[in-house]
Image: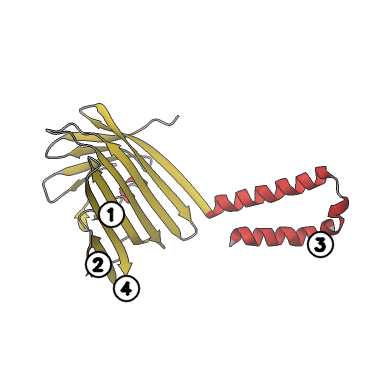
Amino acid sequence: MITALLFMLLIKYLASHTILRRMRRTSLKHLARISVLMILMVVLATFLLAQGSTLEYTIKQRGIPIGNLQFTQSVSAEMTVLRLESHAEPRVVFALTINAKEESIYNNDIMTFSSICRLFNNKGKLNKKTRLKGDGYEIQKGDHIEILQLKPIRFNMLCMYAREPKGISKVYSDILQHFLDIKQIANHHYQIHFPDGTYNEYFYENGICTRIAVYHTLYTGSIELKPYQ
């Protein structure tokens, strides 16, 4: 919408200065200048419409890198899209490879959709979705669908990467499909416990998640922000 408006304003400007009527007689140099101006305006509009950021992490177990994780946040008008992709090969009692893709969409700060897909050893698959539906949410586990009367979700697990949860006590778990408690341990240090007894600890600097300590029943590890290049 903004891009189209900018084009209309540009054409109006050109017409008001009789450039369109003289364009056939204008030198290639002047035409090039006009083209550059139009391109710059489109680039500016695109930047205003969608601003994004990407964070790269290294997944470690016992201090040894075993995978990578990429988190992306895109903001466009009233919509925010969070995405995560990861690949890890944790060292447990058997060979294990985990590939994960997650996505969350927020409109006016309310989550309208989320999905989480995990592939284990390129065979076993976990696939869950949460969709805003009327006064609640439709949750999907494989082929099973049910409606839950949940309050509007404003903070889910992907948001833990996007910003520090100051003043936030609950987080929606997309994989468990219910809310979990967020406990502040110290300044910029938070903890989330899961029903199976495992837990994660999150550390922040300047509002950015720099490290996640993972305490699993089969292993412990960390997810560490890569230094900026």
- On residue 168, which mark appears? 1
Q: Residues within 10 Å of mark 1 (few under 14, many from 20)?
A: few
Q: Residue at x 79, y 47 (%)?
A: 31
Q: Residue 110: horizontal and vertical position, in percent?
A: 36, 62
Q: CA distance from mark 2 to mark 1?
A: 17 Å
- On residue 16, which mark appears? 3
Q: Earlier in the sequence, mark 2 or mark 3?
A: 3
Using the image as rendered, state which of residue 69 and residue 150 is in the foreground: 69
Residue 50 is left or right of residue 192, and the answer is right
Using the image as rendered, state which of residue 116 and residue 212 is in the foreground: 116
Residue 52 is left or right of residue 214, and the answer is right
User: Is residue 174 at all visible to an observer of this figure?
Assistant: no
Marks 1 and 4 close (CB-CB < 8 Å): no
Residue 217 is left or right of residue 56, and the answer is left
Identity, as a three-letter code, of the amino acid under mark 3: Ser
Q: Residues within 10 Å of mark 2 (few under 14, many from 20)?
A: few
The scheme the figure's colours follow is: secondary structure
- On residue 42, which mark appears? none
Residue hosting label 2: 150
Q: CA distance from mark 3 to mark 4?
A: 50 Å
Q: Residue at x 30, y 38 (%)?
A: 87
Q: Is disc 4 placed on a helix, strand or loop?
A: loop
Q: Is disc 3 placed on a helix, strand or loop?
A: helix
Q: Residue 59: horizontal and vertical position, in percent?
A: 28, 34
Q: Is disc 2 placed on a helix, strand or loop?
A: loop
Q: CA distance from mark 4 to mark 2?
A: 10 Å
Marks 1 and 3 close (CB-CB < 8 Å): no
